[in-house]
Every structure is written in structure tokens, then in C-alpha cells.
Amino acid sequence: MFKGIGRQVVVLKNTDSDIFEEAIFILRDGTKASKTDMLTECERIIKNNCTGKIRLKKKSKNKKLFYWGLAIFALIITVVLLLIICL
């Protein structure tokens, strides 16, 4: 949470990555570092924090409910049409 304090932020855009659109780093107060030092630190943080495990979002329950509802609707329409045709 920011409480009226100006923070320095480094935003890496156009990463030419198929995975990441951008990366955001927030510098500690009073930090003075060169671009090379910041790049080295960013690489160190990424290397130490990427375990190789990727967390995927679980399938949404709403999506499953939608497909079940669609299937039930199709079944009801089929039954109604069969009743109309048979009568």
C-alpha cells in the first residue's frame, strides 16, 4: 500500500517474450543503482524465484455449469420437438 510516498518503479515493457507482456519492479526507498546493477539484480531475482513449476488456473466452475446447462437445454428442445412431431 502506498501512503503518499513517491516510489521508483522499473517497468520492463515489450519484453519480446511469448510468456510475459511486462515485468514490474519497485525499488526500495533511497536506492541508487545503475541500469546494469538493476538488470543484474532483476536476473538474480528471477533465477532464484522461478522454480520451474507453473501454476495453472483451475477450470472455472461457471464454465462447467454453462456446458451442463447447454446440454440440458438441447435435451429439452429435442424432447419438445419430438413431442410436437409425434402429435
Image: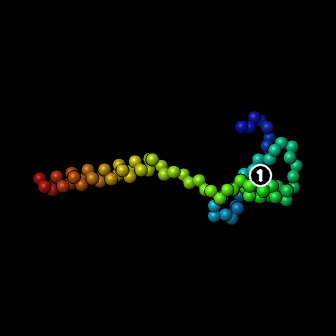
Residue 25 rendering spot, x and y as whole percentages: 75, 50
Q: Considering only vertical position in the picture, is 26 above or below 20?
A: above
Q: Is residue 81 left or right of residue 41?
A: left
- Residue behind mark 1: 10
Q: Is residue 30 visible?
A: yes
Q: Position of residue 83 (x, y in %)?
A: 16, 52
Residue 21 position by quadrant = bottom right
Which residue appears at 48% of the width and 51% of the height?
A: 59
- Decide if residue 35 is in sight here: no
Please report the residue visible at 69 percent of the width from the left and 56 percent of the height from the top: 50
Amino acid residing under circle 1: Val
* Viewport quadrant of the N terminus: top right
Residue at (15% x, 56% y) in the render: 85
Secondary structure beneath label 1: strand
| Above or below 47: residue 32 | above
Would you say 63 lies left or right of 51 here?
A: left
Which of the pair 39/80 is nearer the observer? 39
Residue drawn at point x = 48 percent, y = 49 percent = 60
